[in-house]
């Protein structure tokens, strides 16, 4: 039958001896009803998709803004290192984070990382390792971490040391083949989410000779189990060095780890030996391979490429020199004077001293967008000179460095770019300098770049590092290297993967529920000899299976709006000023269009504020907003602190992550405590970085308000928690949950278990 059928169906009910027709339904009526239902469902799905996209934009905009802030901060600290004399207090405060490339022979580092003097107590009940490690021990680690056990610091150092030795033998680009196995499994970002890795192993099997894996970087940060993920992957790599391959990601960088949680995680889990563990991990991260090629046809790299990416160059760089990819190391050819102090207890020979002395320049990041890749690469550092107080001798030293380059015949742009380089580079060493800088740009692009829909290659001003590259760059690169597919990670995708550039670039992301439960799926792929990806998607949380589409979108949307409300409240002072620009008569009211314009100008987040205003503004009168009442509607609870300058509080709220990063840098012994003087110096650094004035009196008032026990030091974690903005709507719920957790876990038990693992 077809759509033109007019036959009807009648339903009868008996009434006495008679049958009475109840309803008559024609096929046409049924069809119209089906069409209406289908139309309603499509509209419903469309609305859900629009809400999900807006939610996604909120999360991603806040995430990328944080990355850009971190890169800018590192640029600023690099500027201090490049332009302050070694005796200045500001330079001494931060110099240790620029010492990661101290000249030292590998045997000396191995002696520093020695684990043999660390005893494992008899009462320790966690996994014990015997080297060379076996597959049973690697599987045992997986089971132990699944059961929330922690590996003793002796075994951690031993495992990391063996990993470091292995990585030093690997090439920059791993080249593997599918001919020895049916399929190779490829995983994207895991970001410390152990449950995702466990689910992958459950679905796909643990690494073995028959189940080889490639893990494409970003193993750490954001999640709470980053060190466990590393230990599992390193253990399997030691067992199957030819079947487990790890690429470096942009988060395998100690500068990024300061902001996004990995440094804090390691120091929290391994209080006694955490500093050595982190130092060894710096070495390991710098030795991770940069890419993997399968069957000479598929390139796997964490971020992407640019118009200058050349695998021949990548294959021969000294990758371990790029301990942080944010700044290039520099080769010193003429002078033997030391820029940084090195361990006095290590006996260095003269040949070692004459090799590589490193002094890195900041990556090229500006708040303003760039027109081209070329202009991006030729720009100098941000000019911080106007906000930094120098002595006369320091100023003369900076000018002397600049003049040295001017007389050497450099172009104006090169002079600007080179203001951070000291006179230790002789004019005859420019070829070496340029070569190193080109290598650094290529490594930076491999780890940080993102694809775009338009042709060309431009600076990635959103992240602050790397570039955006278009389909034409992909086509050119593939043709040049005789490849057919690029598999990269670095970006969270709602379905766990996404093709672009005519299906020649594949983004793969393996951390499910990355922003919030239900926000995205994770995915991994299997690649066989035909090189056609087979996708497996998943969500690690059981909760997602119980949620409907509406519930899942609603939960994620609430979480995103909460984060956005916190951002709005943290910028309260600037927003008030922006609102008052539109409210010339001081009525306390502005139009909704003016509200959207002001919010966009202040927050600098690429969001559709006019669309989002219905979610953020609930009470209006004739399309006018009372902006003082609106701040109350944001439902954000401030900490109750007396006698603290409002400017300081605003800075705390808005730049909380940046301030914590500086605290972690200043905390040179990784104790979690800093002195009052270091606390003041931290605020001076932050005020210079933000180009704002914070008085000594305001800082002193802040010290008095938080020094409750009068012990002369400040606990970083307690300080940051004391000034955390809280969502009022969930405050009481969270407080009850904290009480239940505290009651369920005796404090004596927690302290005992921690002390056994250090």
Image (tube, grey):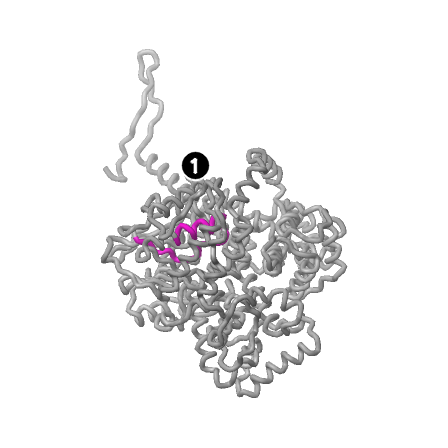
Vertically, is 42 above or below 418? Answer: above
Q: Residue at x 34, y 45 (%)?
A: 136
Read off the magenta span.
212-234
Residue 736 drawn at (x, y percent) = 60, 35
Vertically, is 415 above or below 289? Answer: below
Q: Is residue 174 left or right of residue 695?
A: left
Residue 713 visible in the picture = yes
Magenta stretch: includes residue 230: yes
Dot 1 alpha-carbon crowd within 10 angstroms: few under 14, some 14 to 19, many 20 or more: few
Vertically, is 627 above or below 551? Answer: below
Look at mark 1 in the image and give the residue it sits on. Answer: 546
Residue 57 drawn at (x, y percent) = 50, 54
Vertically, is 49 above or below 435? Answer: above
Q: Residue at x 26, y 58 (%)?
A: 531
Dividing the picture into quadrants, the one containing residue 527 is bottom left
Magenta stretch: includes residue 626: no
Q: Residue at x 33, y 35 (%)?
A: 30
Residue 700 drawn at (x, y percent) = 75, 57
Q: Nearer the viewer, residue 241 or 692?
A: 241
Q: Nearer the viewer, residue 369 or 754?
A: 754
Residue 564 drawn at (x, y percent) = 57, 51
Q: Secondary structure at mark 1?
A: helix
Q: Residue at x 71, y 50 (%)?
A: 711
Q: What quarter of the picture does the N terminus occupy?
A: top left
Residue at the limit of the structure toward the top, as seen here: 16
């Amino acid at each position: 039958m077809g759509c033109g059928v007019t036959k009807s169906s009648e339903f009868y009910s008996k009434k006495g001896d008679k049958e009475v027709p109840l309803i008559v339904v024609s096929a046409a009526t049924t069809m119209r009803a089906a069409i209406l239902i289908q139309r309603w469902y499509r509209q419903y799905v469309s609305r859900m998709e629009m809400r999900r996209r807006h939610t996604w934009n909120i999360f991603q905009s806040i995430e990328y803004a944080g990355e850009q802030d971190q890169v800018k901060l590192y640029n600023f600290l690099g500027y201090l290192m490049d332009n302050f004399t070694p005796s200045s207090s500001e330079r001494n405060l931060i110099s240790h984070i620029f010492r990661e490339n101290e000249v030292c022979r590998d045997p000396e580092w191995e002696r520093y990382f020695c684990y043999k003097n660390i005893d494992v107590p008899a009462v320790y009940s966690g996994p014990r390792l015997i080297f060379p490690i076996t597959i049973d021990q690697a599987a045992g680690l997986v089971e132990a971490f699944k059961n929330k056990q922690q590996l003793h610091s002796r075994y951690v150092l031993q495992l990391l040391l063996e990993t470091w030795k292995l990585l030093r033998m690997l090439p920059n680009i791993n080249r593997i083949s599918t001919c020895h196995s049916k399929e190779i499994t490829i995983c994207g970002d895991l970001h410390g989410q152990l449950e995702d890795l466990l689910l992958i192993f459950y679905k796909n099997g643990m690494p073995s000779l028959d189940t080889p894996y490639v893990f494409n970087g970003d193993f750490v940060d954001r999640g709470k189990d980053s060190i466990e993920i590393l230990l599992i992957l390193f253990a399997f790599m030691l067992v199957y060095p030819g079947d487990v391959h790890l690429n470096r990601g942009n988060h395998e960088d100690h500068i990024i780890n300061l902001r996004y949680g990995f440094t804090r995680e390691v120091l929290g889990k391994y209080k006694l030996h955490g500093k050595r563990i982190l130092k060894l991990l710096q070495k390991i991260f710098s030795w991770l391979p940069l890419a993997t090629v399968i069957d000479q046809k598929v390139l796997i790299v964490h971020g992407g490429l640019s118009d200058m990416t050349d695998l021949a160059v990548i294959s021969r760089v000294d990758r371990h020199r790029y301990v942080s990819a944010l700044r290039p190391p520099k080769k010193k050819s003429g002078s033997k004077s030391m820029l940084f102090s090195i361990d006095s207890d290590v006996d260095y020979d003269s040949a070692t001293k004459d090799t590589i002395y490193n002094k890195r320049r900041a990556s090229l990041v500006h708040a303003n967008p760039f027109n081209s890749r070329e202009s991006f690469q030729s720009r100098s550092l941000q000019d911080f000179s106007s906000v930094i107080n120098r002595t006369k001798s320091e100023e003369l030293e900076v000018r002397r460095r600049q003049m040295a380059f001017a007389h050497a015949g450099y172009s104006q742009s090169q002079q600007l770019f080179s203001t951070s380089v000291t006179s230790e580079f002789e004019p005859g060493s420019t070829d070496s300098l340029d070569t190193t800088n080109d290598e650094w740009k290529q490594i930076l692009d491999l780890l940080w770049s993102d694809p775009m829909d338009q042709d060309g290659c431009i600076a990635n001003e959103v992240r602050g590092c790397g570039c955006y590259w278009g389909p034409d760059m992909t086509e050119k690169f593939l043709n040049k290297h005789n490849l057919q597919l690029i598999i990269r990670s670095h970006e969270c995708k709602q379905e766990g993967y996404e093709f672009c550039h005519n299906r020649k670039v594949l983004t793969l992301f393996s951390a499910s529920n990355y922003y919030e439960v239900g926000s995205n799926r994770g995915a991994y792929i299997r690649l066989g000899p035909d090189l056609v990806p087979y996708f497996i998607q998943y969500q690690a949380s059981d909760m997602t299976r119980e949620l409907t589409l509406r519930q899942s979108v609603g939960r994620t949307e609430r979480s995103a709006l909460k984060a956005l409300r916190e951002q709005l409240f943290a910028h309260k002072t600037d927003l008030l000023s922006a609102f008052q620009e539109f409210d010339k008569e001081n009525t306390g009211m502005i139009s909704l269009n003016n509200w959207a314009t002001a919010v966009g100008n202040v927050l600098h987040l690429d969001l559709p504020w006019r669309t989002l205003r219905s979610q953020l503004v609930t009470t209006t009168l004739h399309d006018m907003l009372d902006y003082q009442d609106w701040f109350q509607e944001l439902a954000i609870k401030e900490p109750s602190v007396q006698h603290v300058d409002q400017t300081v509080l605003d800075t705390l709220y808005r730049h909380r992550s940046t301030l914590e990063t500086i605290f972690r840098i200043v905390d040179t012994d990784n104790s979690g405590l800093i002195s009052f003087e270091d606390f003041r110096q931290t605020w001076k650094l932050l005020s210079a970085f933000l180009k704002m004035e914070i008085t000594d009196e305001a800082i002193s008032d802040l010290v008095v308000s938080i020094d409750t026990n009068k012990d002369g030091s400040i606990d970083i974690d307690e300080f940051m928690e004391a000034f955390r903005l809280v969502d009022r709507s969930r405050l009481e719920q969270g407080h009850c949950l904290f009480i239940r957790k505290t009651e369920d876990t005796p404090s004596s038990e927690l302290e005992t278990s921690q002390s056994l693992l250090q």
